[in-house]
Image (cartoon, helix red, strand yellow):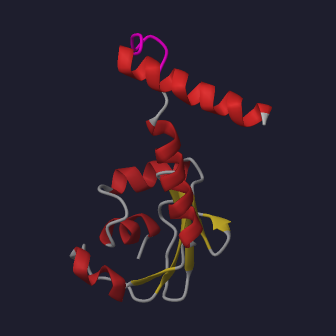
Amino acid sequence: MRVDKYLWCIRYYKTRNMVTEACKKNHITVNGQVAKPSKEVFPTDKITFRKDQITHTITVLDIPQNRVGAKLVDMYRKDETPIESFQHLELLKLSKEHYRKHGEGRPTKKDRRDLEDFSLDFEEDETE
């Protein structure tokens, strides 16, 4: 089965066109080699691809006949993606949560007081 169809069948991408675009951008490798969309995959092949800021690594266990349900996906692949990748993504999301973009308006009175209290606490800790 082609790598683009395989990744679509096991529900990593919504459309085969999205897989094709990822292949053109060299985001997908099969057994360490950059893959074109037409690259054939076989059981025991290792597929590595980057999606949503995470580098996923999967091993092909079996080839599905067509697109499978979400509950059946584990029969066709073994996910070897390190847990640290998902934890790193969560940390990135949390760190961006408190960032105020330039031009989103000035802080409210409560926000300003909280910032002042925080900076005063920080300055007191440094002087001690």
Q: Is residue 49 above or below residue 107?
A: below
Q: Is residue 108 visible from the viewing direction of this image?
A: no
> Outermost residue, right direction?
127
Q: Where is residue 39 in the image (x, y as percent from the top left)?
A: 52, 68
- Name the quarter where the N terminus is drawn: bottom left
Q: Which residue shows up at 42% across the image and 63% down it? A: 4
Seen from the viewer's position, the closer of residues 102 and 29 is 102
Task: State the image coordinates of residue 93 (x, y, percent, origin top left).
Answer: 47, 46
Identify which residue is drawn at 54% across, 88% down: 44
Answer with left or right where residue 111 lies relative to residue 120.
left
Magenta region, mostly helix, strand or loop? loop
Q: In this view, does 53 lie above or below 62?
A: above
Which quadrant of the structure image shows residue 119? top right
Q: In the rendered image, is residue 64 in sight?
A: yes
State the residue at coordinates (56%, 63%). 85
Q: Does the magenta stretch include residue 106?
A: yes
89 left or right of 67 in image: right
Q: What stretch is highlighted in magenta?
A: 101-107
* Residue drawn at 54 percent across, 71 percent down: 83
Q: Is residue 99 left or right of residue 6?
A: right
93 or 19, which lies in front?
A: 93
Identify the image quadrant of residue 74: bottom left
Which residue is farthest left?
69
Q: Does the magenta stretch include residue 46?
A: no
Q: Position of residue 117 (x, y in %)?
A: 53, 26
Task: Quarter of the image for the C terminus: give it.
Answer: top right
